């Protein structure tokens, strides 16, 4: 009581604190007295905690009495003391400071909340000399997050409160993120408050526009908006995230987008993950991708629009992350995407998210599932584009092995539903493969197209479905086209000057020559068989034309050119003879295809007589049969003729004439004059046409394509009886073999040693005699240098004269 009445008897630190407050709060902090207080705190650091406690006591009293002017002065004094003092005892002072900040934040007055936040931000920027083991920021995280969601009626005040909340969260992050001894801000309990608060402020109408990798220079007004501030804070938070903290930082983003249905417009979701991918350290990119893939799996029964949004975000993230997007588990990424593709096909066919029961509470829209499937295919291409060449090759083999083919061990489902599912699966997987192959660049075709991969791909080329065949052709074209010539052959035409195409041509490499020797005949056979299909349309012929031309440019030597000319002449014969009963359009298209190819190849190999023959035939067609040229066939309304069987010989390209003119220029005339006949394999006959049930009752047919008479081998019908007989016979043979082995073992176990030795000795003697006979027959003495003829086996022989005893003529001696 005495101290309260007599100011001189009060402790010095209290007098110094009291002196900084003026009589009128509008006069502000008394600066001279503040300097004295600061000097005292620096001179006697042990008093700092008492100064803080007393200031805190005054501030709490002033807040309760609504004397907000003195509250501001007290906070200003605290800020100056914090900035000036860095001694070891500052921890106790900080506790008082944080207590006062918390008191201000608890106030309902927006100005006090903003004042407390500003003081906390200043404190957050101070680097303390000594760590604090017991300080907790839980209250501040909760309170600042609450301020970020302010719904004050006044727009300006609401904006200020939200910005203060964001700044406060930024201060908490800066204060704790790099100090392992501080509270772990990366714990889910904190991240679940911080990240959604920042996203809430990012989520705005103006956010629809895409953002750049780093914040652009903006006007002062834009810098002060909660949206810009929230983005800056989020970037800073993610930039500080270590490897083990990425998951805790990304999970709240996914939950926020789920809870607020923000995947469907996908603009905001894409914007968020663009910020995330540009902000985190590049080596952590694959962790974000894995989180998104896991979230896609978790939402596998959500609406197609939601899944499509997740997949498109994945695609954007993969492009940004580039080589770091896939991480160590390359095939797992593609396996997840292909699994989602397969599920989507099942959903579209069954109309239910639960394929087993067929009962669903949600309505599945097929067009939405198709949009999702296209998004998955695009994303597969985005991911593959970030991989090195060898991994792209592995991914393509992986996808191709997933394609269900009748000729493979892949499971083929029977029935109408099974056929639809198989067809859709084949189309979607081949689309995915095409997306990967478009960005695939490889100089060595042997490594680009391994034998097993090429076999499966070409077997798909023989499917009845025209769409599947077209995809296979496009995939092959994308592999072969390594110089970007594909678009120059997009339309089939008979141009008179090939130089206008400005083709990029390189000399055929040794690896390409080896590839064509190994796989050339296989490619030719499949091109030939595709040409015979009845349901080909213009797109198929354009793809075939592109493929023939690209092989001629990219992979051709003289031998390949000869084979391609033979192949095209054989295709002309298909249309001319018409054993397959093709339509008039198909026949005219094949004639036009051959004319366009021979026109260009004649200009490429520049043999004048060959060019002249091709030019003459094309001119004749222009006058007498324009419907055999691409300009009349490959148009919107083709001009066809029904009298294709009465064409004169002058409108055809003749093999004898071509072999004659090219043979005179150094090409292989014998090979040119031999008609091309593909060697049909079982795969060609069985892979596309027969279902599994039909294959069981197939008759074995062997046809000799090389025989001029084509003799038919008698057909052997495989029936139940023949199969039963084969099984019984094989069982009897096995029984006989088993009995013989038993007798041998029993003999060696029970017979006396002398008998076994005699038996083995007799066998050894027999073996030795046979060997002696063989040696006597095969071994001959060396030829005699003296000219003596060695006698035949069994007759006396003259021994050869040694070299040193031989007499040589003088001319032979040097």
Image: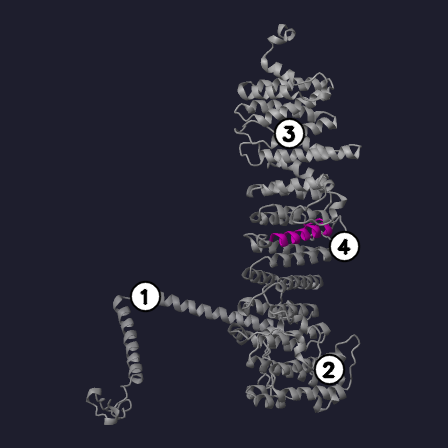
In whole angstroms, how far apart are the C-alphas of marks 3 and 1? 97 Å
Residue assigned mark 2: 629
The local secondary structure at tag 4 comes to: loop
Residue assigned mark 3: 120
> Which residue is drawn at the image coordinates 63% and 20% (left, top)?
32
Looking at the rendering, the stretch of residues picked out in magenta corresponds to: 300-321
Callout in the foreground (1, 4): 4
Which labelled disc corresponds to residue 748?
A: 1
> Which residue is drawn at the image coordinates 55% and 86% (left, top)?
668
45 lies above or below 522: above
Callout in the foreground (2, 1): 2
Callout in the foreground (2, 4): 2
Q: Earlier in the sequence, mark 2 or mark 1?
A: 2
Magenta span dominant secondary structure: helix
Tell me if 521 is positioned left or right of 753 in this view. right
In whole angstroms, how far apart are the C-alphas of marks 2 and 1? 83 Å
Tell me if 266 is positioned left or right of 187 in this view. right
| Figure quadrant of residue 696 | bottom right
In whole angstroms, how far apart are the C-alphas of marks 2 and 4? 45 Å
Which labelled disc corresponds to residue 365?
A: 4
Q: Earlier in the sequence, mark 2 or mark 3?
A: 3
In whole angstroms, how far apart are the C-alphas of marks 3 and 4? 53 Å
| Outermost residue toward the left in this view | 805
* Magenta highlight on residue 306: yes
Q: Earlier in the sequence, mark 3 or mark 1?
A: 3
| 776, 730: nearer the viewer | 776
Which labelled disc corresponds to residue 672?
A: none
Label 3 packing within 10 angstroms: few (<14), some (14-19), many (20+): many
Across and down, in percent, residue 371 comes to 73, 56
């Amino acid at each position: 009581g005495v101290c309260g009445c007599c100011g001189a008897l009060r402790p010095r630190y209290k007098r110094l604190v009291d002196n900084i407050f003026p009589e009128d709060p509008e006069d502000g902090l008394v600066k001279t007295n503040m300097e004295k207080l600061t000097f005292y705190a620096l001179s006697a650091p042990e008093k700092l905690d008492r100064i803080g406690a007393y200031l805190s006591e005054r501030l709490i009293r002033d807040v309760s009495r609504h004397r907000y002017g003195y509250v501001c002065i007290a906070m200003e004094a605290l800020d100056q003391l914090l900035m000036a003092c860095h001694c070891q005892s500052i921890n106790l002072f900080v506790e008082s400071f944080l207590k006062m900040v918390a008191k201000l934040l608890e106030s309902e007055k927006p100005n006090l909340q903003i004042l407390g936040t500003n003081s906390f931000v200043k404190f957050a920027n101070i680097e303390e000399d000594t760590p604090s083991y017991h300080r907790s920021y839980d209250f501040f995280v909760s309170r600042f997050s609450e301020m970020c969601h302010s719904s004050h009626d006044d727009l300006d005040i609401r904006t200020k409160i939200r910005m203060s909340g964001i700044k406060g969260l930024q201060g908490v992050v800066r204060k704790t993120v790099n100090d392992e001894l501080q509270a772990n801000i990366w714990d889910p309990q904190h991240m679940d408050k911080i990240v959604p608060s920042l996203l809430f402020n990012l989520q705005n109408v103006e956010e629809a526009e895409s953002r750049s990798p780093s914040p652009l220079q903006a006007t002062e007004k834009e810098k002060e908006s909660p949206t810009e501030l929230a983005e800056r804070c989020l970037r800073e938070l993610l930039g500080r995230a270590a490897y083990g903290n990425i998951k805790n930082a990304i999970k709240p983003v996914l939950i926020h987008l789920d809870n607020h249905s923000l995947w469907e417009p996908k603009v905001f979701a894409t914007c968020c993950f663009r910020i995330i991918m540009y902000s985190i350290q590049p080596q952590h990119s694959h962790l974000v991708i894995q989180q998104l893939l896991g979230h896609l799996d978790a939402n596998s029964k959500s609406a197609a629009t939601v899944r499509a949004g997740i997949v498109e975000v994945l695609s954007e993230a993969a492009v940004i992350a580039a080589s770091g997007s896939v991480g160590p588990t390359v095939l797992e990424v593609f396996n997840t995407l292909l699994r989602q593709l397969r599920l989507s096909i099942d959903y579209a066919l069954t109309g239910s998210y639960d394929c087993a029961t067929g009962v669903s509470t949600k309505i599945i829209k097929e067009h939405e599932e198709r949009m999702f499937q296209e998004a998955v295919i695009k994303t597969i291409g985005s991911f593959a584009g970030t991989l090195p060449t060898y991994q792209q090759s592995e991914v393509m083999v992986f996808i191709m092995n997933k394609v269900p083919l009748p000729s493979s061990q892949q499971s083929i489902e029977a029935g109408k539903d099974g056929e639809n599912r198989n067809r859709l699966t084949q189309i979607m997987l081949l689309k995915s493969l095409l997306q990967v192959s478009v960005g695939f660049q490889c100089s060595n075709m042997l490594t680009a197209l391994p034998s097993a991969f090429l076999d499966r791909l070409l077997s798909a080329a023989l499917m009845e479905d025209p769409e599947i065949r077209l995809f296979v052709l496009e995939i092959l074209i994308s592999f072969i086209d390594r110089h970007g010539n594909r678009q120059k052959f997009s339309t089939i035409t008979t141009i008179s000057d090939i130089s206008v195409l400005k083709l990029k041509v390189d000399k055929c490499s040794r690896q390409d020559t080896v590839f064509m020797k190994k796989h050339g005949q296989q490619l030719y056979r499949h091109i030939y068989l595709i040409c015979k299909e009845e349901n080909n349309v213009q797109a198929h012929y354009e793809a075939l034309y592109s493929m023939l031309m690209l092989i001629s440019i990219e992979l051709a030597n003289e031998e390949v050119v000869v084979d391609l000319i033979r192949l095209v002449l054989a295709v002309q014969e298909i249309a001319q003879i018409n054993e397959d009963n093709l339509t008039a359009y198909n026949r005219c298209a094949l004639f036009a295809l051959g004319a366009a190819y021979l026109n260009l190849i004649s200009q490429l190999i520049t043999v004048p007589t060959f060019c002249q023959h091709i030019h003459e035939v094309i001119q004749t067609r222009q006058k007498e049969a324009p419907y055999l040229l691409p300009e009349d066939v490959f148009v919107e309304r083709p001009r066809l003729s029904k009298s294709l069987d009465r064409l004169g010989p002058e409108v055809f390209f003749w093999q004898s004439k071509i072999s004659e003119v090219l043979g005179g220029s150094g090409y292989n005339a014998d090979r040119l004059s031999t008609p091309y006949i593909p060697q049909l394999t079982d795969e060609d006959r069985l892979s596309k046409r027969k279902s599994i049930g039909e294959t069981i009752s197939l008759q074995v047919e062997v046809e000799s394509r090389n025989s001029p008479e084509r003799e038919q081998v008698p057909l052997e019908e495989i029936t139940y009886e023949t199969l039963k007989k084969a099984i019984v016979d094989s069982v009897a043979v096995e029984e006989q073999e088993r009995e013989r082995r038993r007798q041998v073992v029993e003999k060696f176990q029970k017979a006396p040693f002398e008998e076994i030795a005699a038996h083995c000795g007799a066998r050894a003697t027999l073996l030795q005699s046979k060997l002696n006979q063989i040696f006597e027959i095969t071994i001959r003495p060396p030829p005699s240098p003296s000219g003596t003829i060695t006698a035949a086996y069994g007759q006396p022989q003259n021994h050869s004269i040694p070299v040193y005893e031989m007499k040589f003529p003088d001319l032979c001696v040097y």
